[in-house]
Image (cartoon, grey):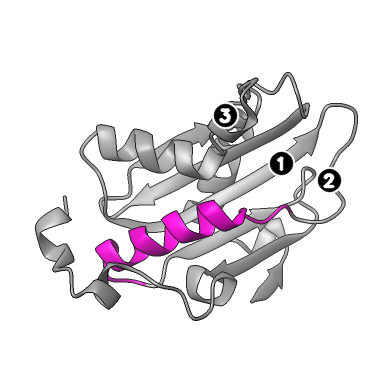
Amino acid sequence: METITYEKLTKIQKELLDEAEKVMENSYNPYSHFFVGAALLTKNDKIITGTNVENAAYGSTICAERAAILRANAMGYNVYKAIAIIARGQDFDTKEVSGPCGSCRQMLYESSQVSERNLEVIISTTKKNKIIISSIEELLPFAFGPKDLRIDVKKYQK
């Protein structure tokens, strides 16, 4: 894991984070009032975004990271290089980065195996004054994925 400043991000990392920030404002969050945006980078450098969508049946809530993965898959993309995540409260900016929840980490790990790469995860505070660059394997050590089940992921790569 590396803590970095916004100025030191690459052009594409900045673009990912900026797109995540834009989509964050579309959050449907009547219960938590917490806004989260995510932006996935496909193998062809296409950026696909997602935001959190809450539900009165709390278990039906979809996080921004999973929303981006689902949207990308529906669009025919399922090989990724990176994801950027940013969050804020209704009345406050985050002081620490908000990492993906356990379910999102598992889905990102599965995506990394399909992508045949250790997915880069960029996590930022609201003001972009603290940014952590990690990998999904760092965020989810000893993970279980399709390769553990001897699944040939190549046929799922688009």
Amino acid marked by disc 1:
Ala
User: Is 99 in front, or is 5?
Assistant: 99
Q: Determine whether, in the image, residue 73 is placed left or right of residue 144.
A: left
The mark that comes first in sequence, 3 or 1, is: 3
Which residue bears the numbered disc 2?
Answer: 94
Vertical position of residue 45 compared to residue 142: above or below = above
Q: Determine whether, in the image, residue 44 is placed left or right of residue 92.
A: left
Q: Quadrant of residue 19?
A: top right
The span shown in magenta is: 98-117
Query: Marks 3 and 1, how far apart in space?
Result: 10 Å
Query: Marks 1 and 2, how far apart in space?
Result: 7 Å
Q: Is residue 130 visible?
A: yes
Which residue bears the numbered disc 3?
Answer: 23
Q: Is residue 109 magenta?
A: yes
Q: How many numbered marks are there?
A: 3
Vertical position of residue 49 compared to residue 111: above or below = above
The mark that comes first in sequence, 3 or 2, is: 3
Asked whether disc 1 touches disc 2, contact meaning CB atoms under 8 Å apart, the reply is yes
Q: Secondary structure at mark 2?
A: loop
